[in-house]
Image: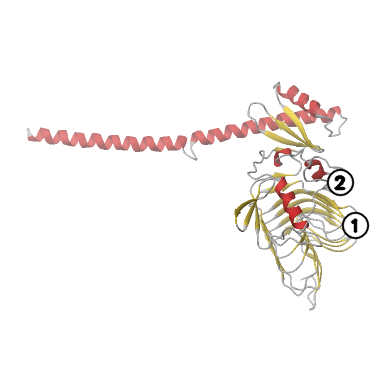
Amino acid sequence: MKEKQRNNGITLIALVITIIVLLILAGIVINLALGQNGIMVRGGEAGIEYDIAHEKEILGLALKDIQIQNGGSMIIPDEATLEKAMKDNSGMEGITAKKSSEKLYIVTYPDSKRQYEVYADGTVQEAAPKVNDDTPGEIAKKDDNTYLIQSIEDLVILSNTVNDGTDTYEGKTFEIVTDLNFASVNSYIDATSTVFGDINENGIEEPLITELTQDAGFEPIGNSTYSFKGNIQGNNYAISNLYINRKENIGFIGIGESNEIENLKLTNVNVKASEKWANYMSAIVAKTGNGILKVNNCIITGNVSSTGSYIGGILGYSESTTTDIQISNCISEIVINSGETVGGMIGTIYYSQGNVTIENCENRGTISGSSNIRWNNISYRQLYRNDYYK
């Protein structure tokens, strides 16, 4: 009798162990199926990728039809033409194409709600989501030393407050917290607003997106009276389609002092001179003054053009006797068309006793000019000591 009880005990223990093992195995299977990298999650991601590829294919076919209708020219005449071409190639009702700016349409699919940016040259890319700015009309603060750039309006406010002398933001940092596209209504709180006035200097107060993408375009941050003394943390987000067409000191930052710029992407910039022989230009910093300029892990693409001098991909010109310049881990795909004194990274450092370091950088853009051209680094560096072209 005692032996029988012992065997029943063993059987009960074995049953409990079996149940525990089965539960563990079930947990593993469930995790494999539903976990962060589970089969169902990966399957869902693959499905989304397929849908996106299919939506882009429809767009591509629609654009091809429009191109054929235009005798080989890629011209989208209006919203209705693009919408009809997409319906013809998909059989889908409700696809909308809204003109965002002169060179951009925002296409929305009715079921997935996904949006795509379609450019005048036929380029298609997924659209950034509509920005959400918690503090429209002012730049939100993360803490006493950090501001958050959440919309194109925030960039305009930053430019205005520096250039009118309200604040140089010395030692402060501006964090980019989302992708921003000057040509897309999604990057504006209100792309139709006229509250900022005649930014592009054509004598007419137009919708903000028009002010920033036509005529003079965006006003660089910092000018010859008030320089920008803050920092930019890009967080690897992209600012696309920056357009500037002004007299001199032309770049995202016009004139800066003691700036640190990190992890910033400027894509498809169009920086050009409105007057012949305009000087001091680049995609990021046109001219720098005193203090240390640090530019790290930045990628820039687009065009910089002028018949003037002192043009670079990262920095146009430095004339201070105390400026240290450190540029590292940067890639420039800027196409530069200029007069003289042109460099892939830096145009000119003139009469500087500061240290200049360019490390692990690459220029992949083309450079043209009349004279004194340096493909990758500094075009011209005149120092009190004899180390030209260091």
Locate residue 357: give its quadrant: bottom right
Q: Secondary structure at mark 1?
A: loop
Most extreme residue toward the bottom is 385
**CB within 8 Å, label 2 to label 1:** no
Task: Please tell me how many numbered marks the rendered image carries.
Answer: 2
Q: On screen, 106 above or below 211?
A: above
| Amino acid, disc 2 | Asp
* Observer-nearest of 7 and 159: 159
Picture disc at residue 307: 1
Q: Count residues near mark 2 (Cα–Cα under 10 Å), then give few for <14, some for 14-19, many for 20+.
A: some
Position of residue 220 relative to residue 67, above or below, is below
Q: Residue at x 70, y 48 (%)?
A: 154
Residue 270 locus on image (x, y percent): 81, 49
The x, y position of residue 255, in whole percent, is 78, 61
**Gap between marks 2 and 1 measured at Cα:** 18 Å
Badge 2 marks a residue whose secondary structure is loop
Residue in front for this viewpoint, 66 or 288: 288
Mark 2 vs mark 1, foreground winner is 2
Residue 151 position within the rendered picture, expressed as x and y whole percent measured from the top left: 69, 45
- Image quarter where the C terminus lies is bottom right
N-terminal of the pair, mark 2 or mark 1, is 2
Q: At x 90% / y 57%, what residue is drawn? A: 307
| Image point (25%, 36%), residue name | 16
The image's mark for residue 107 is none
In the rendered structure, the answer to whether residue 100 lies left or right of residue 128 reads right
Give the camera-side residue of 52 and 225: 225
Q: Amino acid at mark 1?
A: Thr
Q: Which residue is mark 2?
A: 215
| Quadrant for the N terminus in the image | top left
